[in-house]
Image: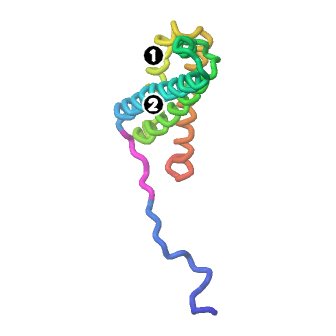
């Protein structure tokens, strides 16, 4: 029954020692973050629009009705809310990846991305949405990037790399 081994000994497996984060290139983190966020958001909007159009076509809607429904600029329309939620999820993913690339420079990279996307969002959305919806989407995007940064810092703190 007892083969002579101490049942209370430490496990024999070797765990890899995690490498501490370094200061990564901010320009690369900003570029990748912007490309992932903008490209992913465009893809999500295209997919939700195609799914909504397919849903309308399956309900025997005419082509004019589908184009009119897709052109609806009401920010509270269901397909716009789904697309916005997907775009915010993509912003979180882009923020986490940018933080990972930037390492200890994550705060600087996220701040630059938020400023660029806020200016772009306010300029491009000025004629598409009312001011309150545009501002709300801008604040939500900035909040999502802050959440990504906070989660990244939390993972570094748990690993013992930052106080």
Residue marked by disc 2:
40
Whether residue 84 appears in this view of the structure is no
Instruction: Give the image location of residue 114, x and y in percent.
Output: 48, 24
- Camera-side residue of 100 and 86: 86
Could you say which is closer to the camera, residue 110 or residue 82? 82
* 104 versus 141 height, above or below: below
Q: Are the residues flagged by discs 1 and 2 in contact, CB closer than 8 Å?
A: no
Name which residue lies at 42% across and 54% down.
19
The residue to which callout 1 is attached is 120
- Residue 61, above or below 22: above
Queried whether the magenta region covers residue 141, the answer comes back as no
Q: Position of residue 61 (x, y in %)?
A: 58, 17
- Could you tell me residue 58's position as x and y percent? 58, 26
Residue 84, percent across and down? 57, 24
Residue 119 or 84: which is nearer the viewer? 84
**Segment colored magenta:** 18-24
Q: Nearer the viewer, residue 15 or 105?
A: 15
The local secondary structure at tag 1 comes to: helix
């Amino acid at each position: 029954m007892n083969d002579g081994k101490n049942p209370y000994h430490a496990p024999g497996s070797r765990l890899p020692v995690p490498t501490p984060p370094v200061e990564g290139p901010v320009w690369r983190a900003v570029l990748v973050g912007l490309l992932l966020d903008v490209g992913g958001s465009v893809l999500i909007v295209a997919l939700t629009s195609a799914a909504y159009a397919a849903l309308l076509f399956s309900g025997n809607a005419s082509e004019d009705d589908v184009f009119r429904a897709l052109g609806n600029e009401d920010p509270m329309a269901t397909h716009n809310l789904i697309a916005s939620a997907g775009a915010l999820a993509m912003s979180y993913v882009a923020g986490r990846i940018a933080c990972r690339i930037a390492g200890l420079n994550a705060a600087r990279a996220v701040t630059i991305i938020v400023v660029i996307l806020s200016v772009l969002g306010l300029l491009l959305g000025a004629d598409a949405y009312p001011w309150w919806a545009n501002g709300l989407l801008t604040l939500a995007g900035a909040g999502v990037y802050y959440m990504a940064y906070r989660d990244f810092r939390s993972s570094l703190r748990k690993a013992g790399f930052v106080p």
